[in-house]
Image (spheres, rainbow, N blue to C red):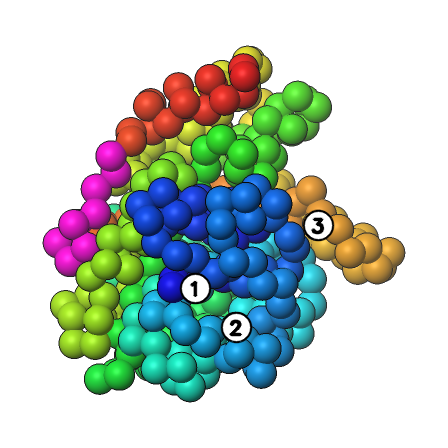
Amino acid sequence: MILVTGGSGFLGGAVVRRLVARGDAVRSLQRQDSPGLRALGVDIVRIDLADRDAVVAAATGCTAVIHIAAKTGVWGTYADYFQANVLGTRNILEACAVNGISRLIYTSTPSVIHAGGDVEGVDESVPIATHFETAYPATKAAAERLVVAANSAQLGTVVLRPHLIWGPDDPQLTARVLARGKAGRLRLVGKGLKRIDSVYIDNAVDAHLLALDLVAPGATCAGKAYFITQDEPMPQRDLINGILRAGGLPPCDKSISPPAAYAIGFVMEMIWRLLKRQDEPLMTRFVAKQLATAHWYDITAAKRDLGYEAKISVAQGLQILKKSLQA
């Protein structure tokens, strides 16, 4: 039995469906129900990962864990992110220890190494950042450290850092680009010339299953973190406009300077705090920096240790996305 956390999410659901398709028995820990996964025979356990005893009990009889569930986004209290991302991961590690589970794949984010400037062609030797402007990367970094430290003779762990996952049914990058494009509120920061990489959903799933099948105590990949991307860095505007074209929308030709985006983000954060709003501002300083800087990575290690490759190119992924949006 493979235990997956976050099966109701975009990546988690895709991983669960792929596992089922290849014949694995799957138990999914998640907050919300997923009738579609139940229909596939998935054992769904609705749970709060911050509940240590419930997590330990839910892992009974499992042989491996793929821990994807997390609180994402760029807005909210540190305490909320800590409960979901750090305490939840700590409980997963406890569940592995109590139940004798020997394999753990943890889904992290490249944001853990982002110190504010351009990130171009770096590999996993770059250390985790020491300062974060928002709780999400801070708590993901803390959780990643826990997972790497837990690698032992009893438990083999692998950390995956997929970057900007997108594709059909993506509620984040794809949905936001299309929604803002339709509303005429999309702007490129710095003309969108900074190079970024991303990863198409099917390729991200491939990486998780490759790691699952290879990890074991003492394995080459055990105790290591890996960037996962398309290995296809391109100007940010090319990916954004590709998504817009897939949705039948005109390309974005409006831009804003990085300093202006940062200033707008600062003002919006202040307004949201004064009004005590819980929803995410349209712009924050963290998002402004992300949009104004380059983000692409050297994935040599993932190719070498995991046998990973992006089987679906960006162009192919955009064609699949287009067909799904036209359906």
Residue at label 1? 3
Amino acid type, residue under disc 3 in the picture? Glu
Q: Which of pointers 1 and 3 lies earlier in the amino acid sequence?
A: 1
- Residue 6: percent from left, percent from top: 53, 57
Q: Is residue 131 visible?
A: no
- Label 3 sits on a secondary structure element that is loop
Residue labelled with disc 2: 58
The reply to whether dot 1 and dot 3 touch (C-beta < 8 Å) is no
Viewer-nearest of labels 1 and 3?
Answer: 1
Q: CA distance from mark 2 to mark 3?
A: 32 Å
- Relative to residue 175, is residue 251 depicted above or below? above
- Residue at the extreme right of the image, as rendered: 275
- Image coordinates of residue 75 in percent, x first then y, are 67, 57
Q: Which stretch is magenta?
A: 303-311
User: Which of the image's four quarters has the C terminus?
Assistant: top right
**What residue is shown with label 3?**
280
Task: Tell me the quarter of the image containing the N terminus.
Answer: bottom left
